[in-house]
Amino acid sequence: MICLEGRVSMRLCLECDGPNPEYKCQDCFGSELHCSTCILSVHAHHPLHRLQKWNGQYFERISLKALGLHIQLGHITGQQCVNPHRAFNDDFVIIDIFGIHEVSLDFCSCAIAESRMQQLLRMSLFPSTTSDPKTAATFRVLEQYHLLSFESKISAYEFYHALRRMSDNTGLLLIKDRYESFMRMIREWCHLKMLKRSGRGHDPKGVEATAQGECAVLCPACPHPGKNLPDNWTDAPRRWLYGLFLAIDANFRLKRKAVSNDSMDPSLSSGWAYFVEDEAYKGFLDSNSDNTQEKSTCSSHNAVNMADTKSNRGLAATGLGTVDCARHNMKRPNAVGDLQKGERYVNMDYLFFSTLRHTVIDTLNVSYDIACQWHKKLWHRMSTFPVSMHLLPAFKTISFFVPKFHLPAHIEECQTSFSFNFKSGVGRTDGEAPERGWANINPVASSTKEMGPGARRDTLDDYFGDSNWKKVVKLGHTMLHKMKDALPERQDHHEALDDLEEGLRGEYSAALAQWREQVEAWEPVTMASVRLELARDDQNDIQTGTCLALHKDCTPSVLISTGLELEEQQRRMKADRAGLRVHATDNQEGKMLQQNNTLQRRIDTWTKLQELYMPSLAALCVSESSVSGGIATAVATPETVKLWLPSQIGKTAPCDTRLQTIEWKLRYAQAHDALRSLCSNLRAQTAILKYKDRNLRGQGANTRARNTLKAVEARLEAAASTYERAHKALVVLAPLLNQTGWHSSLRPLNQADIRSMTDLLWGESEGTRKLSWIWNMRGAAPDEMDKDNALEDMRIEWCKVRARAMRWAEEVELLKEEMRRILQFFEWDAQCWDERGLEDALHDVDDDDECEGLIAYSKRQASLRRRLAESFRTSWTDTLALADIFNHSLVTQQDMDID
């Protein structure tokens, strides 16, 4: 490196052997020296190289312009123009990968000369303006920035100033500022490349005829009727193989500040790629701005509850909503749009219906982290959309799912109804595709948030297109990797199911057959359903004349049910009193006293009715008083009064069996309700903690989150206390009523059992952890076959094993079908490019050079598709052959099992 600072013993010109050569090029290969004449001759074809001149002591920078080099456009390099026209003020600027250059440039003004813009483009120079350009960028520097921005997320500002420093890293030279020109050229370059790659340059109707979404890079693995599906796919017996998987999500990092507007900064594409057409989108939102979004009935989903309240101060867009291909993580045409506040249904509905205009697939699998809420009135909301965006749900099979990572934060009902694990025909899809894509696009948020609306949409369209293309060319590796993972998993889970069923066939063959018919026939018991059942029993007794009620307004079931309500009020009173501080205010003391008096009156009224049904209660109370008669006691407060329910009496005094039975049923349901409350609040706690960790910053927001967590913890303690009381009562009543088989579903509750699905105990890891039993809670069946309910547990485990085996088998079939579709899509695409390059299709093109370029580009694109297909086919051959062998062995094994 030090030697190269000098002349390295070069004392003669490399070309003419002249003495004392002074010039060397930084960008040519080698460090040879040339004289001034030879250096100009050598660089006639390299006018943008950087030169250095030996001044007797060291090399200093000198430009080819200073040596007299002129760039002549409109002619072959080296040919003189008879009528040259010098660029404005002889200070034309060219931006290249080696830096920012001032050059002497002459346009051709001959009679047959092309426009100045065309002359620049013929030399691979992209002009900054269409009329009288003074700046241009080489195609190679634009291509270099284009790829660097995709891979490193470098901004145009950083790239341009890096080029500026390559020209002069001292600040001593005056480099003309062409940053705004560079920004304009980059945006136009990216737009033109998108049009070129989508075949718009071959359309005789011109760019103006571009249809909505036509420039989007399609996913070859997704089903496209007429492109990669069999002709009879609508009549195929396994229609689930041709289903379309969609994933909906929002990203609040890709916001945009309230700068510029659409009139000052319009989009160049206007809905031709991934963004929806902005004018129609905003018009629809304005016409439906008064729609109120209903609150979540599931866990507290901020995406639902905060959709209309999210702060948008200083922002024109708070983020993006998107609809992706759920299995291959590719953006869909016309499936991206700005969010004005939060994740409102009106925004996400528009994106959903907009992208579905591009398909006629009638089997849809839709994944959304709030699908349980969003899908409820979807078809009603669709009626407000233009008819062109309507679907016909009666003629479509549409299933809604919650992504697997998001599912644990939902209530138990959602975890079953919206799970990918329990729905047939979805394989091992997880629905989390959009989340993986955000990691790639989020780094550009710092640049795009400062852009105008059009520039931002065009930039993000460009990034989404590149992301899709990278996934397309990697499909060979991606699909192969998935198939290699799926084949052994399918085999292992199939063997696990066979082993389990083999052990069950001997003693429980009838039960196994029943399980196959009713995989998920269980319905949980609730307090509300038990109260309804008891009320119907009372009504039946009244109608048949067998009613044993001793009071016209209080049946035995009402008595016990009211007693449980009073017990719960006592618990709340204790909690409220414990929450009072030492120096409570008069207002707090007054409210507590009012609650105290109200509860006391209710207990007194209930006790009088209780004596009618439990005559031995008076003697029991006297006996209790005599036991503690020697101890001075204070006046009992309402929350400490013993209610003497049948479970509290036990065997110490006679009690009507009917009252014990009623309490048993209510306690059993109360215990299940308490467990469900525990699970629901644990899910809420998990969701709040994740939201707090990801989104909340600052003392105020974290304080409010801690207060919310305290409220959830209070509900957890209440549910645990209720369950412990119910379980204690069941333990007392069970031997009195000969009740068995309930212990496996209602176990003693320890503090370690109260944990979320993802929590680990000390010493556990993800591979060894076990779920707390509260998440496996099931109601005991009325026809239990053994007291420990082991058969019920086995049924549950069998269902899970069967579901896993089915999903992996489906995954293999889906992957095989997707591989077939990819190859067929490439062939279809290649044929389209072949047709674009036919001379008959280009008969309107008068320029021979343009016609040859159109044909060459179409042939190159067609060849690329076929080479990709051949490469994928070759890499998949052995694995697909192995899959067929596995299929044959599985079918043979199933036939043997049937025999």
Image (cartoon, grey):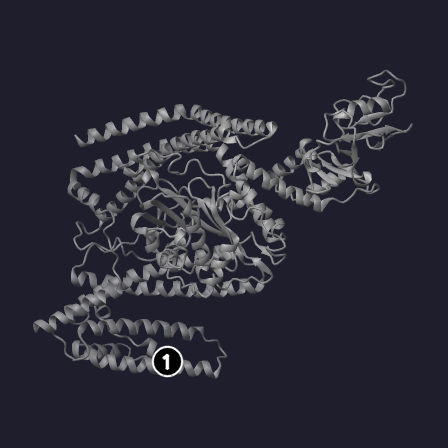
- In the displayed structure, does residue 724 sit left or right of residue 660? right
Relative to 395, say whether 225 is above or below: above
The residue that disc 1 covers is: 595
Relative to 424, 711 lies left or right: right
Residue 104 visible within the image: no
| Residue 354: x %, y % from top left | 44, 50
Q: Quadrant of the N terminus?
A: top right
Image quadrant where one finds the C terminus: top left
**Residue with the most extreme right position:** 56
Going by the image, does 38 lie left or right of 889?
right
Relative side of 33 to 214, left or right: right
Q: Residue furthest front?
A: 111
The amino acid marked with disc number 1 is Gln
Secondary element at tag 1: helix
> Residue 169 location in percent, x, y?
79, 39
The residue nearer to you, when weighing 666 against 204, is 204
834 vs 799: above or below: above
Q: Residue at x 73, y 27 (%)?
A: 75
Neighbours of disc 1 within 10 Å: few (<14), some (14-19), many (20+): some
Give the residue at x 58% y 61%.
698
Q: Position of residue 340 (x, y in %)?
A: 52, 59
Q: Position of residue 135 (x, y in %)?
A: 73, 40
Q: Nearer the viewer, residue 681 or 805?
A: 805
- State whether residue 94 appears in this view: yes
How many marks do you count on the picture? 1
Q: Quadrant of residue 78?
A: top right
Task: Give the farthest residue toward the top.
Answer: 17
